[in-house]
Structures are given as C-alpha cells and as structure tokens.
Amino acid sequence: MSDPNVTPSARDWPYLADAERGALRELLIHGPLPRAEIARRLGVSRASLTRATRVLMEQSMITEGEVALRAAMGRPSEMLVVRHDTHHFLGVKLTGDAVFAVVTDLGAQIVASVEEPLVSTSVSDTVDQIAAIHARFAERFDDIHAAGVCLAGDLARVDGRQIVVVSFFLQWRDVPLAELLSERLGIPVTADNDVRALTAAEHWFGAGAGCDSLAVVTVGAGIGSGLVVDGAVVTGHHGRAGRLDHLIVDSNGPSCGLGHRGCASAYLPSESIVEAIGVPDLDYAGAVELARAGHEGAQRAFDDAGRALGVLIGTILNGLDPEKIVLTGEGLAVVELAGDSIDRSIEAVRLPSEQPVPLDVQPFEFTEWARAGAVVAIRSVLHF
Ligand SMILES: [Zn+2]
C-alpha cells in the first residue's frame, strides 16, 4: 500500500487559480458567454478575467467562438466556449452485476462507452476490471485526467477518507474504493452515490444547470432523490441525505419489506408495481402494457405509484423550496399513466402556493449514470 496521504495529482491537469476555475465553471454550466458577462458573474475586473481566460486558452480548455452582435451595447462581443477536443474523464457506474463506463470530454459529452458484466462482486476483481477498462481507454485517450465511479449505496467521508459505507447490491461494507482505484489507475478517483452523481450532472450539465437549489428524483428499480442547496450537492453526515424512498404514504398500506407499512417503496419501484398487479410472470414492461390497455388492476397499481410519487415531490417542495425538481429514471411510465394522481397528491401535500410546481420530466438513458460519474470527476478536479 502506498502512503494514503499522497494522492496522485490529476494527470497533466494544471493548477488553476480561483478566477480561472470560476470562468471555466461558468462556461461549462451556461455555455458560450462573452468575457464581460463572465466578469460580471464572477465579480472580477475585466483585466483579471482577461488574464484568467488567457490561461484557460493556453491550457487548451477554452477557445474563442463566434462573435455575437449585442445590439444594446452597439459593439460586437466575442464569445468564449469550452473546447470539446481536449481533456478527457472516465465515468463508471457499477450495478450488482455489470459495469458501465464512458469517457467524456470536459463538457461531459460522451465520446466512448463500454458495458461489461461484472467479473464478480469482490472488491479486488472490481478494481481489476475497472483498471483494465481504464487501460483500454487510455490507449485512445492519452489525457484522461481523473475518474468518477458511482453506485447505489451509502458513500461518505469517514476520517478524511472516502468510503463506500454500505452497498446492498454489491454486498460491500466500509470499502475505500476511491483510494484503491486511485492507486491502481494513477489518477485521482472520486466515488459517489449514483443518485448524488446524477444530481451533480443535472446541476452542471442538465435540466438543472445553474440552479442554486435543485432536487433530482429518480424512479425505476429504486427511488432516489438528490438535493442541491445553496449551489452545493448535499451529502449528509452519513452520506444518506435525500433518502426519501421510505417516506410513509399510507400507514395502512402494504409492507415494503423493511418494516414499514405503506411507504413510497411499497408502491413506486418497478417491482412493487408488478407485485401489486399480481399477474403471474409479469415484468415491468408488461405492467406498462397492461395499464395502457386499460387493465383495471394495472391502472390501480400505477395510480398508487403516482400517489406515492406525488407525496414525495410535495414533501421535497415543502422542505427544500427548490427552483426546480428534475424527475427522471427508467420508471417514467408512471408520469404517462398516472399524471393526474401525481398532481392531486402533490397539491394535497404541499403548502398552499400560487406558484406552479417546478417539475421538469427528463427522459433517461442508462448511460446517464456513467456520464454522471465523469461529471463527478470533472467537478473534483475543479474543486466543486
Ligand atoms: Zn419502507
């Protein structure tokens, strides 16, 4: 084991001063901007900003784009843009039986991807497998600066070390995954909870780009929710912030298997919907088809799922007062099949308000998880 206090520095990733990091972050989040606008947003002088952008250009991170004519100011203004041909990052999503990996550019656009079954769920096999994937990608991309790995589970900083406290799917406890991978790959590696990583991705590169407060809710095999408060993704003391998947919806409802009656997990996950319908050999896709065809039991199961989702969203609205809630995941059929039920239940739970519900439904592809891992890596080299 190497000295745990020495972590590899980001490969070829230069030291960036505050104004440089800030300018790059603004361009990553908001897209092309003129210098004057970046200076205004950061509260720095034009001269400081010019120095900062010169460094970013020398490092091949940004370039000058089109000239936008700004009528109000009466003079042309050169737009700065992030370069998409330099600087790469590795993003990995682990499930209980597979590894999904992508390489993205600095703007979090996927440029390569791979999907493999997990060799085994042992920690050492998993580290070996990710190292092999990294080595193959490194033959094509010689500028992979950092990696981010995400998985379902509780991840937190314990005594200064980033630890997978528990992962149910991988049956891991207290695994210093980021440290192990960082030693093997020779680049900084960050590990994070998958929903939190997705929240970080939505916060910089997705529907929530630039929102100071944001909630991301995922529906599918499980229920996830991630929170951004005052511009920062919330981790919580035990790495469990945003865990609303066992929120009680109806205390007389069915059991979730963890000792609650009628919590959101008893209604909303794909498996709970399938179980509630009670048709033999049914899978989730079949459940969606039945509900679309007007099957009464299937419609009722989706209605109940929608009600649970509405309680969850209404609770987040009350507790966080977010600028936006992004709803995504593999289980979005509930929005199509039980939209009214979701709306009614949000209204029943939320505090009286004239404001419309800031709900943004985003279609989901599974590669989003691995991309979210890369976003965590990008944010880590930029210290956000
Ligand atoms: Zn429960």
Image (spheres, rainbow, N blue to C red):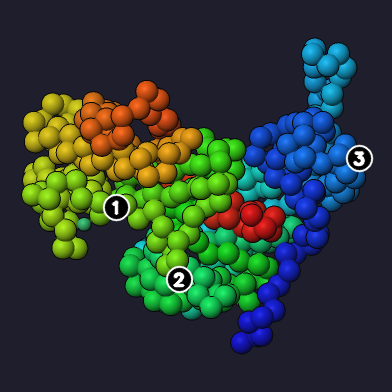
Q: Residue at x 12, y 35 (%)?
A: 300
C-alpha gap between disc 2 and disc 1: 19 Å
Q: Callout 3: helix, strand or loop?
A: helix
Q: Is residue 305 left or right of residue 253?
A: right
User: What is the number of the mark on residue 164?
Assistant: 2
Q: Is residue 103 above or below residue 48?
A: below
Q: Residue at x 37, y 39 (%)?
A: 317
The three-letter amino acid code for the residue at tag 1 is Asp
Q: Is residue 299 above or below residue 223?
A: above
Q: Earlier in the sequence, mark 3 or mark 1?
A: 3
Q: Earlier in the sequence, mark 2 or mark 1?
A: 2
Q: Callout 2: helix, strand or loop?
A: strand
Label 2 vs label 3, nearer the camera:
3
Q: Pinpoint residue 143: horizontal percent, then vertical percent.
A: 74, 58
Q: Pinpoint residue 175: horizontal percent, then vertical percent.
A: 46, 76
Mark 1 Cβ and ligand 1 under 8 Å apart? yes
Q: Which residue is mark 3?
A: 47
Return the residue nearer the eye: 54 or 10. Answer: 54
The three-letter amino acid code for the residue at tag 2 is Val
Callout 3 touching callout 1 (CB < 8 Å): no
Q: Callout 1: helix, strand or loop?
A: loop
Q: Quadrant of ligand 1?
A: bottom left
Q: Is residue 81 left or right of residue 124?
A: right
